[in-house]
Amino acid sequence: MTTAVAYNFAYLDEQTKRMIRRALLKAVAIPGYQVPFASREMPMPYGWGTGGVQVTASVLGPDDVLKVIDQGADDTTNAISIRKFFQKTAGVETTTRTADATVIQTRHRIPEAPLKDGQILVYQVPIPEPLRFLEPRETETRRMHALEEYGLMHVKLYEDIAQHGHIATTYAYPVKVDDRYVMDPSPTPKFDNPKMHMSPALQLFGAGREKRIYALPPYTQVISLDFEDHPFEPTHFEDVCALCGAGDSYLDEVVTDDQGSRMYVCSDTDHCEQRRAAAASDDGAAA
Amino acid sequence: MYVAVKGGETAIEAAHELLAHERRGNPDVPEISTEQIREQLGLAVDRVLCEGSLYDRDLAALAVKQARGDLIEAIFLLRAYRTTLPRFGYAEPVDTAAMEIRRRISATFKDLPGGQVLGPTFDYTHRLLEPGAGSPGAAAEPRTSTPVNEDAVPHVSSLLGQQGLIEATEAARAAPPVGDLTRDPIAFPADRDVRLQTLARGDEGFLLALGYSTQRGYGRTHPFAGEIRMGEVEVSFVPEEVGFEVPLGAITVTECEMVNQFKGSASAPPQFTRGYGLTFGHAERKAMSMALVDRALRARELGEEIVAPAQDEEFVLSHTDNVQATGFVEHLKLPHYVDFQAELALLRQLRKEWTANRAAAQTEAPDRREAAE
């Protein structure tokens, strides 16, 4: 082994990409169904986005413009690490602007700006099985999906209401896809769930360690599970972003001193920057 | 204004520079070479190439050095490199009966064809720290005897098998071909070929604990170490365009055959059963643990009641890979503040409601409260 090892475009060899693309096609054909695939060891650890990285590597072309976010932000450590990985191995153009990206790899968030036709959103998924914490056995959960046997999930949500007065799931909130499969949206906050519904973008989900791929083709119905008398409610914030003043974006809480002072800022850094830039140019125009 | 702490690219680079600095340690102490690691920390190298599933002692030594001696990190380095290698095909099955033996012991017979060969072992050493260990004087030329075995040494199990006292091995399967864990995702229930592959690259510590648990009664299998052998076996390959076996070279392997308590039925007389372990390199503890766990996992096939963790195929196979395990455990270091924020918001709401409900309950029935007090 020398240090000057030449890797294939986007790291993975073409055979592996073909295998992953086959899984992706199957996943697109059966929205919300978890397709097993022969996940490879990647040069970053399992649990750090290997599934998303393999999916991105398989769909990326030389003309694509890539954006990578973690917690909504382009400058979080792991987002930087993954972006650098593709800069190095694929040499593609990268961006932080949601609107300019053709492929967006994400962990835990969906960008605030609405996605467009032709964009691909790649999710990093730790545990693809929405029923896993109700039933640890894969043999059982696969059977439950096959039989569309989702009663257990509804019982869990009901028990939440009986115990807490609310459905106590705030992220990785289960959805039903195209009236068939119950799907885990990856641990995005439930705030983001409505963005998945009828999205014009192609949404691909990769779970490397668990060796599963699933997908939402553009304009797929994605409904968050709920009850008639306890309808799904996305998280609301009483505060606004301290930097851009946004009142409709997902906010990170930042502790600013040891006296309990806090401020809230947009978790989507691009969204925040665009808003601040727009406000600045408005001010400029006014002056 | 204070802006949320985000990890900058510069911070990551600086952290990696610091890592390189720490790796080197005190520069007044001579740097260790990969050759030294390969030759003098041979068992660490063996563990890394075994669980890294790549038989290359030099790369394994480099991985140990680069990982600062963190063997799981070294295993991960080797695995990540391994996946980039082109796949030419599958080797022919190695013949461990034809092994050039360096160590071979049986706990079931006092003496047997091929004899007991202790070889290089920690067994029977007194575990006293010896400051001189590894110094030039301590390594005298080893005493050698004429090789006991010019010919192939039969397995203990084959000796038992001649009298039908132990179950026959599964016939080598021509079709369907042997599964490949690295090319197909595991599906449950898994066959023994894929189970053994999983165990062979599984974490030594995890398998040790599981094997130990079967000895303490959690899925007891009454094992005897029928045979443990370590030495060199030849690996050969049939290239399609040539059409005959071509030897590629020799590798060191450790093999363990456990002889376990019998089963019998109305149609078959009682027989011992088998547990099997095989590892790259000299990895005796791992091979023994693997054999114990393999036997425990055969519970379904042998019609035993599945009551213990070591018998539970999904549990064992899903959690034995230390590269997967360490990645997922350590991913908790990644930021989770988006999800945590969602939990915080709900918790605050629940607490607010709880306080309001309690206040309401108190104003409703103040008299009763007073009476009770």
Image (cartoon, helix red, strand yellow):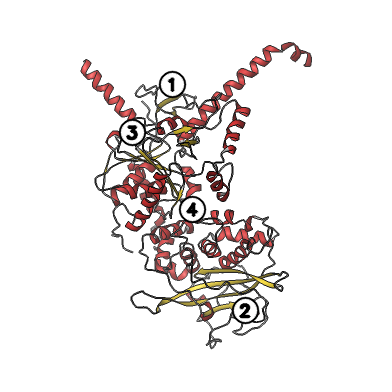
- How far apart in space, not on screen, are marks 3 and 1 (Cα)? 25 Å
In the picture, the disc for residue B324 is 4
- How far apart in space, not on screen, are marks 2 and 3 (Cα)? 67 Å
For label 1, the crowd category at 10 Å Cα-Cα, with few meaning under 14, some 14 to 19 and many 20 or more, is some
Looking at marks 3 and 1 on the same chain, the residue that comes earlier in the sequence is marked by 3
For label 3, the crowd category at 10 Å Cα-Cα, with few meaning under 14, some 14 to 19 and many 20 or more, is many
What residue is at 61 percent from the left and 85 percent from the top? B113
Residue position for label 1? A239
- How far apart in space, not on screen, are marks 3 and 4 (Cα)? 33 Å
Residue position for label 3? A115
Please give the chain letter of the residue carrying mark 1. Answer: A
Query: Which amino acid, mark 4?
Result: Gln
Instruction: Compare residues B94 and A59 and report the one nearer the observer.
Output: A59
Instruction: Compare residues B74 and B287 and report the one nearer the observer.
Output: B287
Vertical comparison of A196 with B237: above or below = above
Vertical comparison of A115 with A126: above or below = above
Residue position for label 2? B156
What residue is at 71 percent from the left and 74 percent from the top? B269
Residue under disc 2 on the same chain as residue under disc 4? yes
Please report contact status of discs 2 and 4: CB closer than 8 Å, yes or no. no
- How far apart in space, not on screen, are marks 1 and 2 (Cα)? 75 Å
Please give the chain letter of the residue carrying mark 3. Answer: A
Helix or strand or loop: what does disc 3 sit on? loop
Q: Position of residue A68 (x, y in %)?
A: 34, 40
Query: Which amino acid, mark 1?
Result: Asp
- How far apart in space, not on screen, are marks 2 and 4 (Cα)? 36 Å
Q: Quadrant of the C terminus of chain A?
A: top left
What residue is at 61 percent from the left and 58 percent from the top? B209
Instruction: Compare residues B266 and A108 and report the one nearer the observer.
Output: B266
For label 2, the crowd category at 10 Å Cα-Cα, with few meaning under 14, some 14 to 19 and many 20 or more, is many
Looking at marks 2 and 4 on the same chain, the residue that comes earlier in the sequence is marked by 2
